[in-house]
Amino acid sequence: MRALWTAASGMKSQQLNLDTISNNLANVNTTGYKRQKVEFKDLLYTTIRKADLNDGVGSPVNLQVGHGVMPMATSRVFTNGSLEATENPLDVAIEGEGFFVAETPTGEFLYTRDGSFKLSVDMDEMRLVTADGYTILSEFDDEIVFMEGMRDISISEMGLVTAENEDGEIEEIATIKLAKFINPEGLESVGRNLYKATVASGEEIPMEDENRTSTLRQRYLETSNVQVIDEMVRMITAQRAYEINSKSIQTADEMLGMANNLKR
């Protein structure tokens, strides 16, 4: 019976849906996290009878039966999360679109919305890095370096980083690089709040001063855009869909039992 396999495909799909919802809820307090949603497509159809209408005679509709459902994509929703004040001068939130650009030790560029930056000390220099130690890049793809003794780090809305040197003078260090993508949903999540560019996302588009539509907020962090209530509703919906698919399997099994017992 088709119903057995059709309902089984529904149960598998709803299991993936529940896995995605669980991951969203697990990251409700993750800085800069963007929630995921599962997109489904129906499977192939068996055509029992095609539509055939000649001179007003015949059937104007097809007689078809489907074979279930399958998940096609897990897309991310890149709406902005709320801003949370931290009073930490190295915490920076992006208000608007775009990503910070981080460079790994292997030279690979990764992208993040997590602005909880740190200072990595190397001899008499300090570099601005992510919590994993990846270098945050300037608009010229250089490291953002502070010399020993610098203090009172300030980051403007346009990303200009300044600090006070040992002589009490304000020095301009660099401008934090922001990048955007034509299709941010095509980015590949690699964990640790990081994304990698793909063919689907397109190459990075640096947001220069003249076309920068986003602003930076120092001493703030962007919270997750997961809404717990919405995810709970989706979880209940997924649970009920899973339950009704399992009921379809039970019903199909009972019908097969009836057919087997006809001779008795």
Image (cartoon, helix red, strand yellow):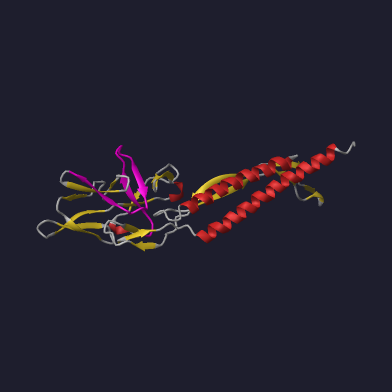
Residue 175 x, y percent position in the rendering = 24, 54
Residue 13 x, y percent position in the rendering = 60, 45
Residue 147 x, y percent position in the rendering = 16, 50
Looking at the image, residue 4 sits to the left or right of residue 129; the answer is right
Q: Examine the structure image and report whether residue 224 is included in the region drawn in magenta.
A: no
Name of the residue lying farthest toward the right: 264
Looking at the image, residue 211 sits to the left or right of residue 70; the answer is left
Look at 49% across and 49% down and name the residue there: 23
Residue 61 can be seen in this image: yes
Looking at the image, residue 159 sits to the left or right of residue 14; the answer is left
Look at 80% across and 40% down and name the residue there: 256
Q: Which residues are magenta?
A: 95-122
Q: Is residue 187 above or below residue 79?
A: above
How many marks are shown on the rendered structure? 0
Residue 30 x, y percent position in the rendering = 41, 53
If the image is split into quadrants, where does the N terminus sit? top right
If the image is split into quadrants, where does the C terminus sit? top right
Q: Examine the structure image and report whether residue 117 is included in the region drawn in magenta.
A: yes
Q: 212 or 72, which is in the foreground?
A: 72
